[in-house]
Amino acid sequence: MDHTLLLLAAGLAAGAMNALAGGGSFVTLPALIAAGVPSVAANASSTVALYPGGAASAWVYRDGLGAICGIPVRPALAATLAGGLVGALLLLRTPTRLFDDVLPWLLLVATATLAFGPKAGPLIRARFRARAGTVLTIQFLLGVYGGYFGGAVGLMMAAAWGLLSEANVKALNAPRTLMVTAANTVAVLCFAVAGAVWWPQTLLVGLGALAGGFGGAWLGRRLLPAAVRAGTLIVATAMTAAFFVRAYR
């Protein structure tokens, strides 16, 4: 069966989602699996395919870069790059069947963090003051998560930063897209060298994601943060449920 239109459409939707709030892999990962790509290779291929769109969004948002929870961009970027390398190497050593079992739980963690982060944030900030070392450690772990899974890492970053600061999702778009792109840069290199990428399918998704990345970043400057968050949460919840059914039916 020809999956060209499916993969192009998935890439377009995912590129826009990543530019708005993250979570594009909730769309591309199931699309690649539906096109016959094994789950570990699908995850690696999804990361590669979404990379150009994410880089395009980071370029559009470049004027909005600022400190992350009081930490300058450069040390946060270094921590993310290191974490991305560790995560990518871990993924390449994970058996496909094990990844199939872990995948829905990773999606659930991302979705729950997005859903409950805004309510938990004020409580955490009232009792805990994040120091530089803590923020950088969290950013390293987010980089590991991004390099290993990729799916919803943008959501995880936005949610984690929201727990430690009062900035809204829209204000975090610029640093989030840069950090996701940084983690993915290392992962893309590792996956390409290891031969884990299914290139024909990846190129189709990437073409759609490139267009979606520009369009989503344009929309992101005009939509209300609440609307962006609500739409992303709906998609995340639906895809998480679908992967639980797939893994445990």
Image: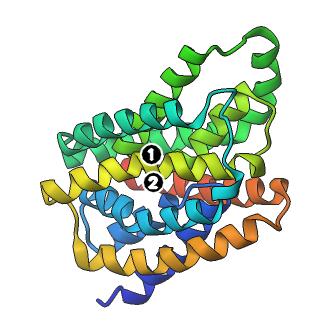
Mark 1 is surrounded, within 10 Å at the Cα level, by few (under 14), some (14 to 19) or many (20 or more) other residues, namely many
Type of amino acid at the residue the image marks with label 2: Phe
- Name the quarter where the N terminus is drawn: bottom left
- How is the protein colored in the picture? rainbow
Q: Could you tell me how many numbered marks the image carries?
A: 2
Residue tagged 2:
243
Q: Nearer the viewer, residue 177 or 232?
A: 177
Question: On screen, 246 above or below 52?
Answer: above
Residue 50's quadrant in the figure?
bottom left
Type of amino acid at the residue the image marks with label 1: Pro
Q: Which residue is drawn at 37% across and 58% down?
A: 47
Question: On screen, 117 above or below 16?
Answer: above
Q: Which residue is drawn at 65% across and 52% down?
A: 174
Q: Residue at x 41, y 71 (%)?
A: 31
- Asked whether disc 1 touches disc 2, contact meaning CB atoms under 8 Å apart, the reply is yes
- Residue 13 position in % (x across, y down): 57, 73
Q: Which of 27 and 147 is in front in this view?
A: 147
Residue tagged 1:
104
